Amino acid sequence: MSFGSVGVLALCIYLVGLVVVAEFARRARVDTTPADHFLAGRGLGTFVLFLTLYATAYSGNSLLGYPGEAYRRGFSWIMATGFMMSIIVMFHVLAPKLRPLAVRHGFVTPGDWIRHRFGNEKAGKPLLIAISVLMAIALGNFLVAQLVAMGHVTSEVTGGQVPFPVGVIGLAAMILMYETLGGMRAVAWTDSAQGLLMAGGLLALLIWLVGEAGGLAAVSQAIGDVRPDAIRVPDAKEQANWASTIVLLGTASVVYPQAIQRIFAAKSGASLKRAFSLMTFMPLTTTLVVTLIGLAAIPRLAGLGEIQADTVMPRLLASWAELGPTQMLLAVLVFLGALAAIMSTADSVLLSLGSVIAVDLMGGDRDRPETTQLAKRVTAVAMVVAVGVALMPRLTLWSLIELKMELLIQAVPAFLIALHWRRLSALAALLGVAAGTLVAVGASLFIARRIGGIHVGVIGLAVNTAVVLVVTALRR
Amino acid sequence: MASRVRIGLLVAIGVLYVLSIPWYREAGALPAGGAAGGWLGLPDWVGVALACYVAIAVLNSLAWALTEVSDPNGDDEDDGS
């Protein structure tokens, strides 16, 4: 039996499993309110919460984009381990203050915080719309990145038996089905199994790669021989980019709507902090592992182009599978783990996108079951649009991540500063968002995505924060 | 006391992030001791960065253990509004 055929069979078994989980989740629902659909009735305990945070944070971007970027940049991509960890560090600024408020006031979407904090101000409504639009664009972008990754993985590992467009369309339909049936419960439960599968699969792949090369030192030596630039100390621009990426990812990721909604969905504050305590180690078991996998591919797969580098992982899996039946089985498990991780992120993003559009932008009542129905219709439309965009991939996966972060980071002052500073007004926050977004988008379109290695989103955030401070000072 | 320790841990994490970036080395230089001359057989500057990130994970986990994430008990919280 060929690797492609085993891949197709495993894919079918996996998809049937998802349907079963979705049905269990549907039966477990308490009611049809948005809180039950989007937050699983606020009942996620430490273990499920940790695994759903893990599976959501580590996505197609991590599993395909990061090895691809390590392949392109060399050892300086060790920065990825640092910036993924910075997300859990930055949650110290958000979670301890936001969580009690969310429980007390029954928040369902990130916009509920904006309504609570700025709702009695004239500029409160425009601010809500501005933040929600930024979030919807970022989520849409993130969804497209996951769909592209799903298509790549499915096509590569089934040996082309499931072509890229069929993989994208078929798996998108599957996600839409189980999310519509089971909401956050289906998402969190599938995430739990998917997270375990992903971590185990990646570790097995790394052990094979490093073992076959004769250890980490031999891998480093081989990289140095093939691509000396990959082991050199990064230049000043790359170092600035390193620092900028830590700020960009660490800061923007804490205002991911799907991450904020998991803060709301935790069973208790204690569950949440235990989940974060565990999450802080996951960059070492995941980001570092995929980085080393991408680096180990440099001497093995020489000469891949910019876009092709995103297929490093599936190419390695395919060559691993050629070594024998055991390796083939393990490679299929890694493939399923990767696919699971991608789908778990896509479903979380889609669920959040539906809630942000239905509740925050279209004004659906967060306590009425009709809003759940509206959100389900919205997610269906959003998925169709995202599939259309995903079928024409023009950017690398890493480019897609950076693009969404540069927009999302402009929402940071309305959350992180507003939580800690009573004097921040809706008008100041709104003007800050407008200025920061203009700088980030304008520079991105007409100058460059990075200036001196610094992301234009980070420069936009600096402008955004400065405007917030100046407007607040002028209104004293 | 726990709050002070937590703040101290977060400051230490900030310092480790600064140390993780190889600004202390000449840009474009080859690794000292060769490609595999650092910790775990990695280039030296990569080994330093990785050691910083391992330390950050440990300190951050401790910081979360010391963080109070309370659930509402009927009192109004300071919500910045």
Image (cartoon, rainbow, N blue to C red):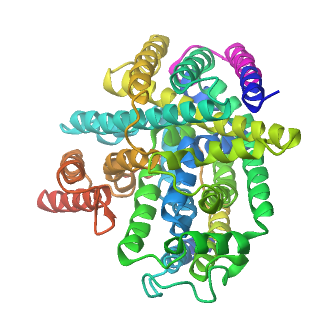
Hey, which quadrant is residue A167 in on the image? Answer: top right
Q: Which residue range is magenta in the image?
A: A13-36
Q: Residue drawn at (62%, 66%), measured in percent from left and top? A: B60
Expressed as whole percent of the image width and height from the top left, the position of residue A212 reads 79, 61
Expressed as whole percent of the image width and height from the top left, the position of residue B34 reads 62, 85
Across the whole image, how many numbered discs are drawn on residues?
0
Q: Is residue A475 left or right of residue A378?
A: left
Q: Nearer the viewer, residue A23 or A268?
A: A23
Hey, which quadrant is residue A345 in on the image? Answer: top right
The answer to whether residue A71 is visible is yes
Q: Quadrant of the C terminus of chain A?
A: bottom left
Q: Residue drawn at (56%, 84%), measured in percent from left and top? A: B31
Q: Is residue A344 left or right of residue A13?
A: left
Q: Secondary structure of the magenta portion, mostly?
A: helix
Expressed as whole percent of the image width and height from the top left, the position of residue B19 reads 52, 80
Q: Residue drawn at (24%, 48%), measured in percent from left and top? A: A433
Instruction: Name above or below for residue B30 compared with residue A475.
Output: below
Expressed as whole percent of the image width and height from the top left, the position of residue A129 reads 27, 33
Q: Quadrant of the N terminus of chain A?
A: top right
Q: Residue drawn at (59%, 36%), measured in percent from left and top? A: A342
Hey, which quadrant is residue A235 in on the image? Answer: bottom left
Residue A24 sits inside the magenta stretch: yes
The answer to whether residue A45 is visible is no
Residue A310 sits inside the magenta stretch: no
Instruction: Name above or below for residue A4 compared with residue A24.
Output: below
